[in-house]
Image (cartoon, helix red, strand yellow):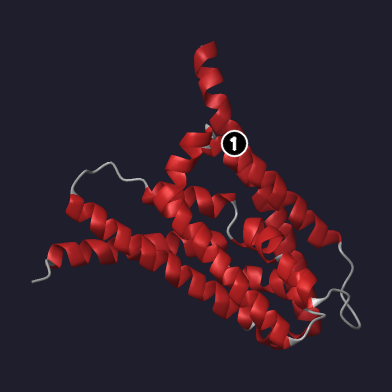
Amino acid sequence: MIDPFLVARALNEFLFGFSTLFAIINPPAVALVFYGRTAAVTDAVRARLARQVAIYALGVLVGSLVLGAHVLGFFGISVAALRMGGGLVVALSGYAMLTAPDVEGPATQTEAELLRSAFFPITMPLTTGPGSIAAAIALGARETKDMGAVAVGAVADLLVAVTVAATIYLCYRHSARIARLLGQEGTRVATRLTAFLLFCLGIQIFLTGFLEAMQPLVRAAR
């Protein structure tokens, strides 16, 4: 018989994890950035790229939720350093998209070239960047040694990663439809605005990591 308490706990952890990662990744907004990068290619290529990005994002999220804290500890990398480095990459990517000319005319990138960019920079850091990785690591870190709670948490983490990845795929797959609903000018404005917010988000992530790294020095100085 299934324990109702464990089911309620799994549901609570799933809802909390999904809402947290969805808010940080914000797939509907980033889908416009994805469309901006793929506006010059066919819908079939865009669909294939969206599927590849979703698969990569699933791997990143599962790895962060399950192994993230152990991997960072093994290499001696702090979450602050992860945020600082990733924040710089996000900011530079946002700035590049913000200042890039509008895509017009035939495709200038081949399918192979776009697919090679599926992991970097489209998956990391534009989709699953340092903010979502740090959040996933925090969500997956559990102090309890109760095997039942650990098992429930692992199942909830897996469901969160799968659901978020599916949401990313659906938003990216239908990014052209979202763009059509907004219209050409609306898409241009929304893409630039999203790129600017992405740039600001990168700066904020960097500052958060920098302040975290400085806290021990400030305490030591006191």
Q: Quadrant of residue 47?
A: bottom right
Can the viewer see residue 175?
Answer: no
Residue 33 x, y percent position in the rendering: 71, 69
**Mark 1: few, some, or many residues within 10 Å (few <14, many ≥20)?**
some
User: From the viewer's perspective, is 5 left or right of 212?
Assistant: left
Residue drawn at 68 percent across, 66 percent down: 118
**The disc labelled 1 sits on which kind of residue?**
Ala
In this rendering, is residue 186 above or below 218?
below
User: From the viewer's perspective, is 37 left or right of 82?
Assistant: right
Residue 143 x, y percent position in the rendering: 28, 41
Q: Which residue position is annotated with label 1?
A: 81
Residue 129 x, y percent position in the rendering: 60, 54
Residue drawn at 53 percent across, 54 percent down: 132
In this rendering, is residue 119 above or below 36?
above
| Residue projecting furthest to the left | 1
Q: Nearer the viewer, residue 30 or 183?
A: 30
Can the viewer see residue 200?
Answer: yes
Residue drawn at 82 percent across, 57 percent down: 96
Residue 88 x, y percent position in the rendering: 71, 44
Q: Nearer the viewer, residue 186 or 73?
A: 73
Residue drawn at 48 percent across, 42 percent down: 71
